[in-house]
Image: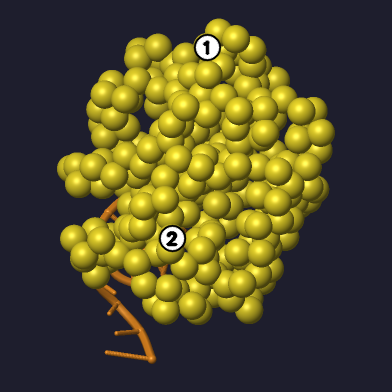
Chain colours: A yellow, B orange
Amino acid sequence: MKIATWNVNSVKARLDTVLAWLKEASPDVVCLQEIKTTDEGFPADAFESLGYNCAVHGQKSYNGVAILSRRPPEDVVRRLPGADGDDHARYIEAVIPGDSGVVRVASIYAPNGNPPGTERFSYKLDWLERLSRHAGRMLAFEENLVLTGDYNVIPAPEDCFDPNAWLGDALFQPESRAAFRRITNLGLTDAFRACHAEPRSYTFWDYQAGAWVKDHGIRIDHVLLSPQAADRLISCSIQRKVRGWEKPSDHVPVLCELVI
DNA sequence: ATGCCGACAGGATGTCGA
């Protein structure tokens, strides 16, 4: 089963690009982030015509996540437990049937959190803590679990071109990295790092300041696997070339293949 | 030291992203 994650930065503005990549890569499951539209505005027809079912958790203008799946998703959960007042659409989870068992997949869009020292930053840390608690509960099932999306965390210095340039940024704050480590330390495997040690492996390049041309990227889109899923890991790749396509998102897809 | 670019809502330009 091929499972992908992609922060598309508006599914409407990116529709042609997303469809082109789906046709080329043919993933079985796709976790989208920053769809930037409501459930009603989601272009489900276009994905259905390619053979995908859509589970959507959208909101107007900002955020918004979705899961596309060739097999119909089951047991869809549209919010991250732990804060009734949180109205940001940043989490959706579903159980996907495979040929040899099922996998629970979550599409995650963690808060940006800039600038540090504000309530936006504490919201980020609180949100990641809620994700950690939820992940701990799901890991107790000892099942195939894939928690993937835009974590908005640069885990380590080698995950960005110039660590000094990111020292003051919420994505690289010690508290942000510690929150990410608390999640992986529950027993989750970073699928990309389990397969690749190469430096300069990035998933995001800013639109500004020629970041793509200069390869000034960061790795913030992650695929985290439960032990059961990690045992089924075949490969994980960053779809770097997509950043060079017409009208690209500032993020590229990450594609992970599992024996499920 | 700040903006750079791009999308959104709305109908000008401010907000947000990372």
* Residue A80 lies in quadrant: top right
Q: Residue at x 53, y 19 (%)?
A: A259
Q: Nearer the viewer, residue A234 or A24?
A: A234
Identify the residue shown where x is 63% and y is 79%: A117
Taking B17 as reference, is A78 above or below it?
Answer: above
SS class of the residue under badge 1?
A: loop
Q: Residues within 10 Å of mark 1 (few under 14, many from 20)?
A: some
How far separated are the C-alphas under marks 2 and 1?
34 Å
Q: Which mark is residue A159?
A: 2
Rendering quarter of residue A51: top left
Per the image, label 2 sits on a secondary structure element best described as helix
Which of A35/A105 is in front?
A: A105
In percent of width and height, residue A116 lies at 58, 76
Question: Could you classify mark 2 by the number of other residues whose Cα lies within 10 Å: few (under 14), some (14-19), or many (20 or more)?
Answer: many
- The answer to which of marks 2 and 1 sits earlier in the sequence is 1
Which chain does the numbered disc 2 sit on? A
Q: What's the amino acid at mark 1?
A: Arg
Q: Position of residue A25 (x, y in %)?
A: 31, 25
Q: Residue furthest top?
A: A99
For marks 2 and 1, give the one nearer the viewer: 2
Q: Nearer the viewer, residue A158 or A174?
A: A158
Residue sitting at x 26%, y 47%? A243
Residue A82's label in the rendered image is none
Residue A78 visible in rendering: no
**Residue A74 in sight here:** yes
Q: Give, as a three-letter code, the residue at label 2.
A: Asp
Relative to residue A142, is residue A35 drawn left or right? left
Q: Position of residue A196 (x, y in %)?
A: 42, 45
Mark carried by residue A71 = 1
